[in-house]
Image: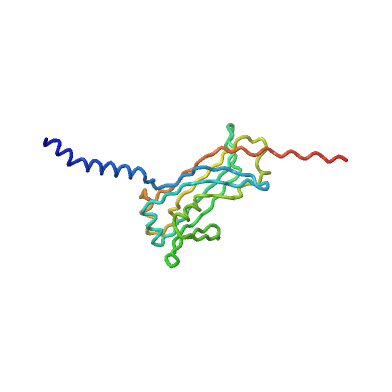
Amino acid sequence: MHCCKNLLTELPHFLLAALLLLLAGTVEAAGITVKSADLQLVDDFYQLRAELAIELSPKVEDALNKGVPLAFQIGVELVRPRWYWFNDTLVSLNQTVHLSYHALTRQYRLNAGGLNKNFSTLQAALDELETLRDWQLIDRAVVPRKSGKLQLSVRMYLDQTQLPKPLQVNAISSSDWQLDSGWQHFDFTPAEPTAAAPPATH
């Protein structure tokens, strides 16, 4: 009887621990993931379309909300693999996107190449950052004909070198600031050349 009473007494603690583990499993770990990437042909230019997932750590989010701007580096490469020699890099582009919070307006701002967009919530700003659209990558004429499958690679990471100096030392040694998708590779097959229209007959 004494044993059963102890079991009943401890049961709520087991349930609480199980609930905490369940909740912990639903929390996404901080980091950046490239979910998909492809090129679409628009007016004889291949444009990048990519979907990412960004989860800021609590420390990074807290620093952002206290006025620390974040710089994200986005790299894109299109490569023709060659088994007999080094790979042929057809194009390699990099862009920096700054994410900042302005306390006076209570808005988040994304800045890329001098273009600014404002958002009322952090999630809205991250949703925009996670979606890469209409990046004009390469002229169709530059892509070798009959090149077979090419390799499209995308990477995004938080650039720690652009943090304020006092934060840089801590960021280098802290996993909270290690936000880097690494290079993610996707196969891409160029569109077949359009056949020339036959001459008109009269």
Residue 174 horizontal side relative to residue 133, left or right:
left
In the image, 12 versus 178, the foreground residue is: 12
Q: In the picture shown, does residue 68 fall above or below 3?
A: below
Q: In the picture shown, does residue 116 fall above or below 3?
A: below
- Residue 5 lies, in percent from the top left, at 14, 39
Give the residue drawn at x 51%, y 54%: 96
- Residue 164 lies, in percent from the top left, at 41, 59
- Residue 152 lies, in percent from the top left, at 56, 41
In the image, 175 versus 65, the foreground residue is: 65
**Residue closest to the far top:** 84
In the image, 102 versus 92, the foreground residue is: 102
Q: In the picture shown, does residue 87 fall above or below 94?
A: above
Quadrant of the rendered image containing residue 100: bottom left
- Residue 137 lies, in percent from the top left, at 60, 48
Give the residue drawn at x 15%, y 36%: 4
Give the residue drawn at x 66%, y 35%: 146
Give the residue drawn at x 60%, y 35%: 149
Q: Quadrant of the N terminus?
A: top left
**Residue closest to the far right:** 202
